[in-house]
């Protein structure tokens, strides 16, 4: 018996390389979801991590830093922060 495949539909999913319970410290949405600014998950919205280890959607932390009251501090622990792009690498 021979089988000939006429059509093949692939399905894929993606995830950030972070613990499942980790959510954005500002909007409280899981990183696999969308931040309030984005329409689709991963839609030009990378994750940013602070030196303290807290993670945020890029759009969320950008809005936070624009506020005068933020003083460049992490919204979670109030440490002076410099944020860097998290590429999901170990």
Image (cartoon, rainbow, N blue to C red):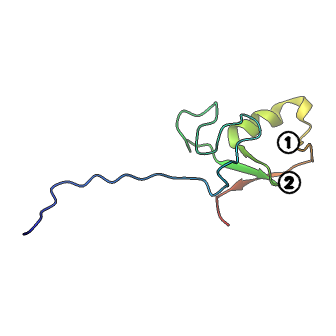
- Image height of 53 relative to 62, above or below: below
For disc 1, the marked residue is 76
Where is residue 55? Give x, y as percent. Answer: 75, 48
48 lies left or right of 30: right
- Taking depth in this image into account, of 59 and 79 the one nearest to the observer is 79
Q: Do the residues labelled 2 and 1 touch (CB within 8 Å)?
A: yes
The residue depicted at 89 percent of the width and 30 percent of the height is: 68
Query: Badge 2: few (under 14), some or many (20 or more) residues near its Cα, within 10 Å?
Result: some
Residue at 76% across / 33% down in the picture?
A: 63
Callout 1 secondary element: loop
Work out how far the residue at label 2 is from the one at label 1, CA to CA, in angstroms.
Answer: 9 Å
Residue 10: x percent and y percent? 33, 54
Which residue lies at the image location 85% right of the left edge and 30% below the top edge? 67
Task: Tell me which residue sits at (85%, 54%) in the image.
Answer: 52
Of 90 and 65, which appears nearest the observer?
A: 90
The quarter in which the C terminus is drawn is: bottom right
- Label 1 neighbour load within 10 Å: few <14, some 14-19, many 20+: few
Outermost residue to the bottom: 1
Q: Give the label on residue 52, or none.
A: 2
The one nearer the camera, 35 or 82, is 35
């Amino acid at each position: 018996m021979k089988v000939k495949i006429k059509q093949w539909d692939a399905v894929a999913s993606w995830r950030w390389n972070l613990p499942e319970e980790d959510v954005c410290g500002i909007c409280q949405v899981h990183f696999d979801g969308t931040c309030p600014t984005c329409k689709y998950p991963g839609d030009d919205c990378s994750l940013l991590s602070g030196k303290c280890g807290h993670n945020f959607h890029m759009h969320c932390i950008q809005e936070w830093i624009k506020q005068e009251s933020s003083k460049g501090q992490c919204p979670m622990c109030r440490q002076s922060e410099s944020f860097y792009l998290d590429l999901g690498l170990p």
